[in-house]
Image (cartoon, rainbow, N blue to C red):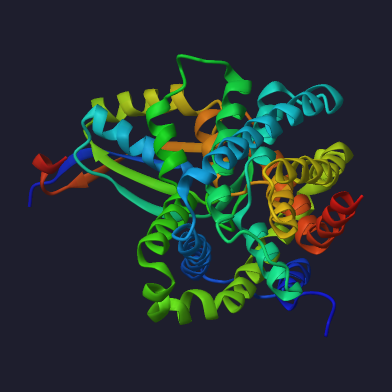
C-alpha cells in the first residue's frame, strides 16, 4: 500500500497543475457543492455519535476546547507583534487565523485516521465548531480593544451564520436527531463518497494554494517560518489539552491537528469586516500557501508520531 | 419618446463588501441596484475570484444626481482607505424616470 493517502496526491496534483499554469479550474459552484458535502458529512458523523453520549459528560471538554481557542491567538499575537514586528492589525489578524481552525485539514486528518485504523471520539466535529469562533473574537479585540466603532451586529452574522458553522452545526443536529439508523438512506452520498469528495476538494485547494504561493516569499521569511513553526508548537498545546480532557490517542491526535490548523474561510471573511486595516494577503498567504500544505503533507503524520511519543513517554 | 437623464453610479469593489454596501444603499434610499461578479487587477493586486471572497463585484445604481453624489461621498469616506474600490458616475438616459 502506498504510504501517502491518495487524497493528498490530489492536492499535490492541484499544486503542480497550478504552478505549471495548466488550464484547470473547478467551477466555483462545484467547489461550493463539494465543500458543503464535506461540512455536512463531518457534522452528520459527529452528530450520530453525540446521540449515544450523555451530554453532561461533555461540558468539561467543551469548556477546555473554548479555552484552547482563546489561548492560541493570545500566544501567537506577541510573537507576531514583537518577534515579527508586524503592525498591530496584521499581527491580530494572523493570530485569529491561526487560533481558528481549518475544516479541510480536519477532513484530511479523519481520512488519515480511518486509513491507519486509528479509533477516535466520533464527536470531535463538535470541537471544530467550538474552535472556529473564539480565536476570531480574540483577534478582533487584540486589534481594536473594545471599540465602539466595531459593528457587532453584522460581525455576529458573519461569525455565527457563516457557511461552515451553519452546515457543521446543522449536520450535527440532523445526525443527532436521526441517529445511525435514520441516516442510512443518505449514507451513500455523505459517508461512502466522503473520500472522493475530499479528493476533489483537495484538487481545488491545490490550485488555490499554488496561486497564493507566489506571494509567500514576498511577505518575508518570517512569515514562512511562522507558518511552519506555529502549527508545530500549537500541535503540542493541542496534545496537552487532549490529554487533560482524557481523550483517546486518536482523539488527542485530532485535537493536535485542529490546534495546528489555520483558518482560511471564516477568519479571512470576519477580519476583512472587523479589522479592514489588516492586510488580508498576509494572513491568507500564510494560512493557505504555507500552513495548509504543511499540515496535510507533513503535519498530520508528524502530529500522529508526536502524540504517540508524548503519550508513551 | 421622451427621455430623462439620470446618473449611473458604478462601484467595483471587493465581494466581501456586498452585504455592507447593500445596507448602505437601502439606508440612503436607493430604489434598486444590480450586482454582478467581476474580476480584474488594480494597484491592490489581482482579484481573480480564485477564492471564496477573493473576487470583485460590480455594483450599479441608477438614481438622481443628488443621491449619486451623497452615495459617492459616503462610499469614499467609509471604504476608500482600507478596501479595493473604484467608483465612477456617468449620465444615462432612462424612459421611466419615476423608477429611479
Residue positioned 44% across, 36% down in the render: B87
In the image, is A291 to the left or to the right of A49? right
Residue positioned 66% across, 68% down in the render: A202
Number of numbered callouts drawn: 0
Would you identify the image quadrant in which residue A84 lies?
top right
Q: Where residue A109 appears, x then y in whole percent?
A: 70, 62
Q: Where residue A183 appears, x then y in whole percent?
A: 40, 73
Quadrant housing the N terminus of chain A? bottom right
Q: In the depicted view, which residue is nearer to us: A241 or B97?
A: A241
Q: Which residue lies furthest to the right in this view?
A: A313
In the image, is B28 to the left or to the right of A271? left
Residue positioned 63% across, 22% down in the render: A142
In the image, is B90 to the left or to the right of A76? left
Residue A38 in sight: yes
Location of residue A108 with respect to B82 vertically, above or below: below
Q: Where residue B57 appears, x then y in whole percent?
A: 44, 49
Q: In the depicted view, which residue is nearer to us: A273 or A153?
A: A153
Q: Where residue A266 appears, x then y in whole percent?
A: 54, 45
In the image, is B77 to the left or to the right of A242? left
Q: In the depicted view, which residue is nearer to us: B6 or A184?
A: A184
Location of residue A71 with respect to A21 vertically, above or below: above
Residue positioned 53% across, 47% down in the render: A129
Location of residue A224 with respect to B40 vertically, above or below: above
Amino acid at each position: 500500500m502506498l504510504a501517502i493517502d491518495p487524497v493528498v496526491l490530489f492536492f499535490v496534483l492541484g499544486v503542480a497543475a497550478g504552478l505549471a499554469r495548466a488550464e484547470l479550474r473547478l467551477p466555483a459552484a462545484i467547489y461550493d457543492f463539494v465543500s458543503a458535502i464535506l461540512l455536512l458529512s463531518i457534522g452528520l458523523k459527529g452528530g450520530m455519535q453525540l446521540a449515544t453520549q450523555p451530554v453532561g459528560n461533555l461540558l468539561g471538554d467543551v469548556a477546555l476546547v473554548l479555552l484552547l481557542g482563546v489561548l492560541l491567538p493570545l500566544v501567537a499575537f506577541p510573537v507576531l507583534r514583537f518577534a515579527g514586528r508586524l503592525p498591530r492589525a496584521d499581527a491580530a489578524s494572523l493570530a485569529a487565523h491561526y487560533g481558528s481552525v481549518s475544516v479541510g485539514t480536519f477532513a484530511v486528518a479523519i481520512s488519515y485516521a480511518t486509513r491507519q485504523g486509528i479509533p477516535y471520539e466520533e464527536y470531535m466535529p463538535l470541537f471544530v465548531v467550538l474552535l472556529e469562533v473564539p480565536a476570531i473574537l480574540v483577534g478582533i479585540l487584540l486589534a481594536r480593544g473594545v471599540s465602539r466603532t466595531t459593528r457587532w451586529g453584522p460581525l455576529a452574522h458573519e461569525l455565527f451564520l457563516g457557511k461552515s458553522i451553519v452546515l457543521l452545526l446543522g449536520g450535527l443536529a440532523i445526525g443527532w436527531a436521526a441517529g445511525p439508523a435514520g441516516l442510512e438512506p443518505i449514507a451513500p452520498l455523505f459517508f461512502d463518497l466522503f473520500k472522493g469528495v475530499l479528493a476533489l476538494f483537495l484538487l481545488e485547494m491545490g490550485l488555490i494554494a499554488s496561486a497564493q504561493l507566489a506571494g509567500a516569499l514576498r511577505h518575508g521569511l518570517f512569515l514562512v517560518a511562522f507558518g511552519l513553526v506555529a502549527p508545530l508548537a500549537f500541535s503540542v498545546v493541542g496534545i496537552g489539552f487532549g490529554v487533560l480532557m482524557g481523550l483517546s490517542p486518536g482523539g488527542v491526535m485530532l485535537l493536535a491537528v485542529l490546534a495546528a490548523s489555520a483558518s482560511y474561510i471564516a477568519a479571512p471573511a470576519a477580519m476583512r469586516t472587523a479589522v479592514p486595516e489588516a492586510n488580508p494577503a498576509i494572513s491568507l498567504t500564510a494560512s493557505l500557501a504555507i500552513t495548509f500544505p504543511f499540515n496535510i503533507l507533513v503535519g498530520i503524520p508528524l502530529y500522529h508520531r508526536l502524540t504517540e511519543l508524548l503519550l508513551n513517554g | 419618446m421622451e427621455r430623462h437623464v439620470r446618473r449611473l453610479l458604478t462601484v467595483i469593489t471587493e465581494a466581501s463588501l456586498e452585504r455592507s454596501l447593500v445596507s448602505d444603499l437601502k439606508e440612503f434610499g436607493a430604489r434598486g441596484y444590480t450586482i454582478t461578479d467581476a474580476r480584474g487587477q488594480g494597484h491592490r493586486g489581482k482579484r481573480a475570484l480564485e477564492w471564496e471572497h477573493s473576487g470583485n463585484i460590480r455594483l450599479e445604481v441608477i438614481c438622481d444626481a443628488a443621491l449619486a453624489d451623497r452615495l459617492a461621498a459616503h462610499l469614499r469616506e467609509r471604504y476608500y482607505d482600507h478596501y479595493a474600490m473604484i467608483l465612477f458616475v456617468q449620465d444615462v438616459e432612462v424612459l421611466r424616470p419615476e423608477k429611479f
